[in-house]
Amino acid sequence: MPFLELDTSLPAGRLPPGLAQELCAAAADILGKPAERVNVTVRSGLPMVLGGSAEPCAQLLVSSIGVVGSAEQNQKHSARFFDVLTAKLGLGPERIIIRFYPLEPWQIGKNRTVMTFL
């Protein structure tokens, strides 16, 4: 069950329509998970500083069970997510940062229990 959180200083009007849905589809493909299990949040217009600069930027947080737990996995994921983000946001790769967090099934609650028991 992947979770993507995109924070950006870009105003909502500069984001392409349907960005959350496009990120959902991209994450499903990149991480090899069904789109029905991907959760996406997009927050725009945030006051942000990246690398000491307040120029437009974005930060993507990717957390999931089983697919973001190694440098080798994340190196591949990073390249593909950067391709999507630079194309959709119109930002250079130096203005985007991605953080990967592996999750365990007991850390996600769903349907009054945790994923361990589903």
Image (cartoon, rainbow, N blue to C red):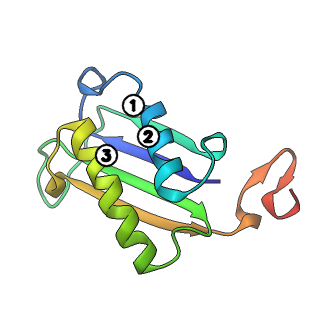
Q: Secondary structure at mark 1?
A: helix
Q: Position of residue 29 (x, y in %)?
A: 49, 50
Name which residue type carries label 3: Val
- Is disc 1 in contact with disc 2, using a CB cutoff of under 8 Å? yes
Amino acid under disc 2: Leu
Q: How many marks?
A: 3
Which residue is identified by label 3?
A: 84
- Residue type, numbered disc 1: Leu
Q: Residue 62: x percent and y percent?
A: 47, 57
Report x, y in % for residue 80: 34, 56
Q: Is residue 93 above or below residue 106?
A: above
Q: Residue at x 43, y 55 (%)?
A: 61
> Does the residue at mark 3 contact the one at mark 2 (Cβ under 8 Å)?
yes
Q: Is residue 109 left or right of residue 56?
A: right
- Measure the C-alpha gap from mark 3 to mark 1: 10 Å
Where's the C terminus, which quadrant? bottom right
| Residue beneath disc 1 | 19
Checking the image for residue 23, the label placed there is 2
Quarter assignment of residue 104: bottom right
Q: CA distance from mark 1 to mark 2?
A: 6 Å
